[in-house]
Image (cartoon, rainbow, N blue to C red):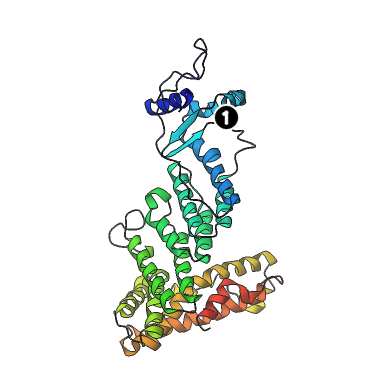
């Protein structure tokens, strides 16, 4: 290790920036004490493409490394007058297990947006190691104090789920303290559960996939009880842990598994357990008589009213329904399979269950009709995820 490397590492350890010059009479860059930021840079596995490797390298060198430097060190890399000296007299820093040279960075030309880097990594990921690197990216951002908007995190969840990497999403949730990915966000929770439902349905409800999806759904239920997610004691009104949309997913998976792969028998009692919880959730705050009858009401209009709506309003209805339908499919399908094919007379609150099935079925039909009417001509409606999900459930 050369002298300049040793000097910089010592500076980092002792919270004092050493003199940056071989000329003893030259003024030191900084002799003032400072507090070194704590944290580490992610160590990435070998990726599947040079393009993805370049994205990961850019993340560490242009975004995360500067975020871990103190203000004096940031001035060193951002000031153009230091560029040639950094090139001729390289200084290395070690943050965590990663050692990197300090290089001049033009904040306008050299630094890509954080979202662009994450999006590129998501789009370039092909195998499990690539997706594990995306989780390490999330850790790197979070430890550097960089936070993303919910819609950006949703892209990670949806793309990973589409790639069959639901277990990677769960890993990110399990490591919430370092990734920042929390089920406290209703949108995140919904996207995770839809991804788990799709894992089973898109396999044709194959035995192994359905069993694994049920295990994943139950892991989500357990994670919600942790303080980093939703666990704050007893669930109060509005708590996602008591939402029908949440409870319906493990019910659906348990019911389908029993109906298709366990000879229609509720051998482990999970179908009855989740059915009881789901029907109880409908009783909360008079949900059956108030909230449920208004399902999709903001987006569904009688056909003759459509002509009075602006093109923008109709587009808003169409896009809203595309995202709402998948969340309600497990309620409809889970109750139907549980009551008709597994539990029969043992179904809790059977009359209310049939009412829910009929009401949701009618609203799903109306929603699909609206989507067919309002979809742009360029869209193949039959290939929309919401339509495909309904077909996978035999509708």
- Identify whether 158 is placed above or below 51: below
- From where the camera sits, is residue 299 visible? no
Residue at horizontal 62 percent and vertical 74 percent from the top: 383
- Identify whether 353 is placed above or below 13: below
Can you give x and y, in whole percent of width and height, for residue 123 in the image?
58, 57
- Identify whether 354 is placed above or below 217: below
Residue at horizontal 54 percent and vertical 38 percent from the top: 61
Can you give x and y, in whole percent of width and height, for residue 368 in the image?
59, 77
Can you give x and y, in whole percent of width and height, for residue 69 in the image?
47, 32
Camera-side residue: 208 or 333? 208
Residue 113 image-quadrant placement? top right
- The image quadrant where one finds the N terminus is top left
- Residue under numbered circle 1: 78
Name the secondary structure under disc 1.
helix
Residue at horizontal 52 percent and vertical 82 percent from the top: 362
Camera-side residue: 306 or 372? 372
Can you give x and y, in whole percent of width and height, for residue 90 in the image?
54, 27
Residue 14 image-quadrant placement? top left
Residue at horizontal 47 percent and vertical 63 percent from the top: 165
- Identify whether 236 is placed above or below 278: above
Name the outermost residue toward the top.
25
Q: How many marks?
A: 1
**Side (left or right) of 238 relative to 119:** left
């Amino acid at each position: 290790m050369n002298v300049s490397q040793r000097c910089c590492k010592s500076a980092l350890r002792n919270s004092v920036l050493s003199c940056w010059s071989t000329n003893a009479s030259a003024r030191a860059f900084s002799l003032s004490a400072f507090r070194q930021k704590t944290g580490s840079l992610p160590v990435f596995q070998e990726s599947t493409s040079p393009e993805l490797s370049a994205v990961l390298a850019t993340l560490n060198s242009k975004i995360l490394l500067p975020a871990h430097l103190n203000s004096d060190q940031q001035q060193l890399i951002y000031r153009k007058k230091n560029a040639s000296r950094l090139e001729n007299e390289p200084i290395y820093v070690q943050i965590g297990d990663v050692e990197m040279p300090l290089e001049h960075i033009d904040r306008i030309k050299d630094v890509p947006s954080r979202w662009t880097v994450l999006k590129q990594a998501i789009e370039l990921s092909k195998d499990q190691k690539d997706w594990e690197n995306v989780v390490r990216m999330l850790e790197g951002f979070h430890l550097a104090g960089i936070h993303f908007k919910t819609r950006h995190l949703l892209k990670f969840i949806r793309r990973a789920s589409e790639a069959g990497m639901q277990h990677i999403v769960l890993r990110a949730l399990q490591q919430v303290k370092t990734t920042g990915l929390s089920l406290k966000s209703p949108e995140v929770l919904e996207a995770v559960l839809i991804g788990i439902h799709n894992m089973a349905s898109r396999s044709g409800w194959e035995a192994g996939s359905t069993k694994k999806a049920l295990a994943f759904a139950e892991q989500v239920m357990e994670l919600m009880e942790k303080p980093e997610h939703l666990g704050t004691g007893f669930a109060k009104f509005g708590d996602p842990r008591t939402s029908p949309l949440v409870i319906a997913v493990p019910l659906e998976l348990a019911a389908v598994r029993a109906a298709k792969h366990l000879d229609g028998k509720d051998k482990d009692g999970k179908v009855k357990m989740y059915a009881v919880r789901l029907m109880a959730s409908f009783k909360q705050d008079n949900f059956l008589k108030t909230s449920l009858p208004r399902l999709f009401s903001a987006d569904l209009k009688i056909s003759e009213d459509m002509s009075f709506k602006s093109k923008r309003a109709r587009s808003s209805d169409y896009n809203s329904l595309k995202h709402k339908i998948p969340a309600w499919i497990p309620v409809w399908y889970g109750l139907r399979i549980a009551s008709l094919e597994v539990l029969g007379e043992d179904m809790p609150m059977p009359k209310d269950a049939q009412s829910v099935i009929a009401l949701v079925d009618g609203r799903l039909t109306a929603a699909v009709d609206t989507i067919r009417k309002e979809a742009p001509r360029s869209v193949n409606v039959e290939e929309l995820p919401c339509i495909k999900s309904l077909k996978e459930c035999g509708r």
